[in-house]
Amino acid sequence: MRHLLRVSLIAALFASSAAWAQNASPVGTWKTIDDETGKPKALVRITEEQGVLTGRIEKLFRGPNEDQNPKCVKCEGARKDQPIIGLTILSGLKKEGDEYTGGEILDPAKGKTYKSKATLKDNGNMLEVRGYIGAPMFGRSQTWVREQ
């Protein structure tokens, strides 16, 4: 009986540490929360390749009277008039200490690209994403919530 209890305890420890390790990275799907309205805007899937994070919009939360497949009409260059669903909005973030820095984030509503950084919060269940011009103090942050 003791042996079975020990094996169960060890298995539980491995399972909880695996879950923690998974949440220790921004890789996954995130619900973006508008910093002005507090409402969900989109689902963004963050992937990592060779230590660099990229985020793509997978779904938009739109009202019934809104265009369900809007295009990035204010974007410039190759992104101009591309569907927002499927658009890469986050790129170039690399881990530096407890943060992910050196990236860019696109605001499709304004068609503008900003420097960005991100920090995991709440045991990896929230991601604070900051877009800024020049220095991080000149920007705004959004909190994204990890989708389970």
Image: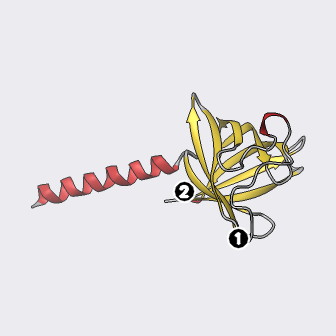
- In this orientation, which residue lies closer to the viewer: 147 or 75? 75
The amino acid on which the numbered mark 1 sits, given as a three-letter code, is Gly
Name the residue: 83% across, 42% down. 113
The amino acid on which the numbered mark 2 sits, given as a three-letter code, is Asn
In the picture, the disc for residue 3 is: none
Where's residue 42, x and y in %? Answer: 66, 58
Name the residue beneath numbered marker 1. Answer: 63
Q: Is residue 49 above or below residue 26?
A: above
> Within 10 Å of the Cα at label 2, are there few (<14), some (14-19), or many (20+) other Cα atoms?
few
Q: Secondary structure at mark 1?
A: loop
Q: Earlier in the sequence, mark 2 or mark 1?
A: 1
> Within 10 Å of the Cα at label 1, are there few (<14), some (14-19), or many (20+) other Cα atoms?
few
Name the residue: 78% across, 45% down. 106
Residue 53 lies in what quarter of the image? top right
Residue 56 visible: yes
- In this orientation, which residue lies closer to the viewer: 78 or 97? 78
- In this orientation, which residue lies closer to the viewer: 40 or 80? 80
Return the residue found at the far left. Answer: 1
* Residue 35 shown left or right of residue 45 in the figure: right
Residue 128 lies in what quarter of the image? bottom right
Where's residue 119, x and y in %? Answer: 67, 49
Scheme by which the image is coloured: secondary structure
Return the residue found at the far top. Answer: 50
Name the residue beneath numbered marker 2. Answer: 123
Where's residue 27, x and y in %? Answer: 55, 45
Residue 98 visible: no
Q: CA distance from mark 2 to mark 1?
A: 32 Å
Where's residue 20, x and y in %? Answer: 46, 51
